[in-house]
Image (cartoon, grey):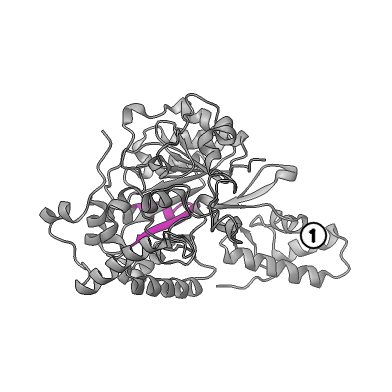
């Protein structure tokens, strides 16, 4: 029997005023002309609720770039879904915020790129930091669940404590400290973003100390960098097992990055009912359960915990989406990850970390910024 | 941070609410959901920010015909403290 889907990630647009160098959007973004209409998203929410989905994460791009966002929140709420807005905050006026709250928004997750303005704007490729601080104040005036999300990487993790202090001053219920995951644009910029081993270990200690210090006040959830782990992450809680993602044009994917895997055809809500896509479509069945698993996963006790890790990572690093996730220390291809980390650690030891951003005219050579879709 | 006292008025934290009815009654919150056992649900349903903790314990003692209200109080304290750590309950 197919498991019940629990969460829908609705990427309602790929348009965004920010250009973050670790954006999880695919390199091939969806143009605004192909975006689902308001009514089509409303149908998706109805179908999702019938499928047993509890949470809808309205994401992007920047979801505020859709003028109908408030109506989408209202419709999702009316279907009984728990609504979460994943946003940079840019485009959120006080009036729009009040409307979102009145129309049933349950939770907002606001991203910060750094505690230091220059560094934050450098990563975002936009002057956004100061505006975000204002928006955090507006948000906190309402009794809506408030999460601050901070993505960490080699360029900012050394001052993680300062980032935690900034988050604390903005009084969220929850702080998500996410080590960059290497897909999409982050994969393109991995050589500049991957932290050293020493940085990772230090960050985990700092996170543990903050969790203890802020217990009962701010809940800190940490996303660890799996390149340095012994075992892979249970990516998306297993392929087609708990979550699904719908891109701006209605294509249904098991995760953010799955479109990189060759040979899979992902179905669209414009052509098929969501329930059929979830239960029956080839793409969702391809890596569901255990039948697809190679050794060492097939006979591994951890297969019911990590589901063989991430299929996209297996393809991106090892060239085969049906192989064990190469970050697993038991994977036959694990040496590929070790080689990459050896390069990063020796390069970082030879050249000290870029603590101040490079000059503007050099930025394009340092990073590949995420552009806007056509 | 204050302890849970008889005069405390516990309530669900921001962004934490009930969804579904009957058997499907579920507590939903940022990034998660919980289906609770009957007694846990009975405690939490009464955490409305109005009732005091003392009232909640009294109501439970009556509802469950308890011979030992102190035990109920002890269990409810442990349960609500745990939910506060997860930022699901304020008091």
The quadrant of the picture occupied by the C terminus of chain A is top left
Residue A203 lies, in percent from the top left, at 39, 71
Question: Where, by quadrant of the figure, is residue A60 drawn?
Answer: top left
- Chain letter behind tag 1: B
Q: Residues within 10 Å of mark 1 (few under 14, many from 20)?
A: some
Between A106 and A288, the one lying in front of the other is A288
Secondary structure at badge 1 equals helix
Residue A368 seen in render: yes
Q: Is residue B65 left or right of residue A331?
A: right
Which residue is pictured at 26% across the width and 47% down the height? A19
Q: Is residue A153 left or right of residue B63?
A: left
A150 versus A248 height, above or below: below
Between B76 and A186, the one lying in front of the other is A186
The residues colored magenta run A135-153
Report which residue position mark 1 lands on.
B59
The answer to if A140 sits in the magenta stretch is yes
Residue B3 lies, in percent from the top left, at 62, 73
Which residue is pictured at 59% across the width and 38% down the height? A80
Residue A139 lies, in percent from the top left, at 41, 52
Which residue is pictured at 84% across the width and 57% down the height? B63
Question: Where, by quadrant of the figure, is residue A99 drawn?
Answer: top left
Question: Where, by quadrant of the figure, is residue A224 drawn?
Answer: bottom left
A8 versus A344 height, above or below: above
A151 versus A268 height, above or below: below
A107 versus A251 height, above or below: below
The quadrant of the picture occupied by the N terminus of chain A is top right
What number of labels is visible? Answer: 1
Which residue is pictured at 19% across the width and 71% down the height? A351
Between A319 and A174, the one lying in front of the other is A319
The answer to if A65 sits in the magenta stretch is no
């Amino acid at each position: 029997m197919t498991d019940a889907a629990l969460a829908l990630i609705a990427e309602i647009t790929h348009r965004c005023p920010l250009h973050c160098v670790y954006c999880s959007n695919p390199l091939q973004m969806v143009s605004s002309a192909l975006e689902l209409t308001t009514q089509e998203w409303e149908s998706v929410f109805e179908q999702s609720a019938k499928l047993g989905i509890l949470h809808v994460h309205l994401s992007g791009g920047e979801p505020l770039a859709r003028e109908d966002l408030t109506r989408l929140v209202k419709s999702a709420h009316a279907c009984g879904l728990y609504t979460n807005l994943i946003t940079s905050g840019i485009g959120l006026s006080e009036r729009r915020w009040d409307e979102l709250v009145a129309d049933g928004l349950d939770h907002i997750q606001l991203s910060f790129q750094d505690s230091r303005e220059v560094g934050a704007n450098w990563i975002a490729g936009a002057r956004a930091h100061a505006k975000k601080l204002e928006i955090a104040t507006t948000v906190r005036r309402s009794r809506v669940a408030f999460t601050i999300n901070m993505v960490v990487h080699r360029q900012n993790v050394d001052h993680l404590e300062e980032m935690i202090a900034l988050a604390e001053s903005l009084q969220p219920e929850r702080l998500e400290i996410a080590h960059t995951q290497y897909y999409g644009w982050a994969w393109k910029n991995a050589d500049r973003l991957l932290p050293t081993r020493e940085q990772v270990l230090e960050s985990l200690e700092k996170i543990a100390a903050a969790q203890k210090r802020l217990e009962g006040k701010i809940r800190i959830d940490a996303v660890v960098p799996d390149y340095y782990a012994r075992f892979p992450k249970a990516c998306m809680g297993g392929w087609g097992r708990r979550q699904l993602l719908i891109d701006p044009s209605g294509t249904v994917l098991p995760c953010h990055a799955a479109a990189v895997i060759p040979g899979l055809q992902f179905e669209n809500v414009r052509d098929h009912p969501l329930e059929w896509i979830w239960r029956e479509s080839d793409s969702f069945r391809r890596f569901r359960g255990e039948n697809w698993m190679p050794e060492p996963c097939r006979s591994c006790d951890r297969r019911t915990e990590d589901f063989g890790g991430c299929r996209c990572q297996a393809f991106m690093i090892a060239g085969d989406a049906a192989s064990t996730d190469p970050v697993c220390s038991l994977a036959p291809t694990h040496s590929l990850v070790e080689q990459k980390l050896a390069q990063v650690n020796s390069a970082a030891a030879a050249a000290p970390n870029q603590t101040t951003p490079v000059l503007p005219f050099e930025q394009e050579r340092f990073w590949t910024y995420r552009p806007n879709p056509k | 941070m204050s302890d849970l006292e008889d005069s405390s008025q516990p309530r669900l934290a921001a962004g934490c609410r009930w969804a579904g009815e009957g058997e499907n009654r579920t507590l939903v919150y940022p990034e998660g959901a919980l289906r609770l056992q009957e007694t846990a649900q009975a405690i939490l349903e009464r955490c409305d920010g109005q009732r005091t903790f003392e009232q909640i314990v009294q109501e439970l003692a009556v509802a469950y015909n308890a011979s030992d209200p102190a035990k109920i109080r002890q269990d409810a304290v442990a349960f609500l403290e745990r939910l506060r750590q997860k930022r699901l309950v304020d008091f």
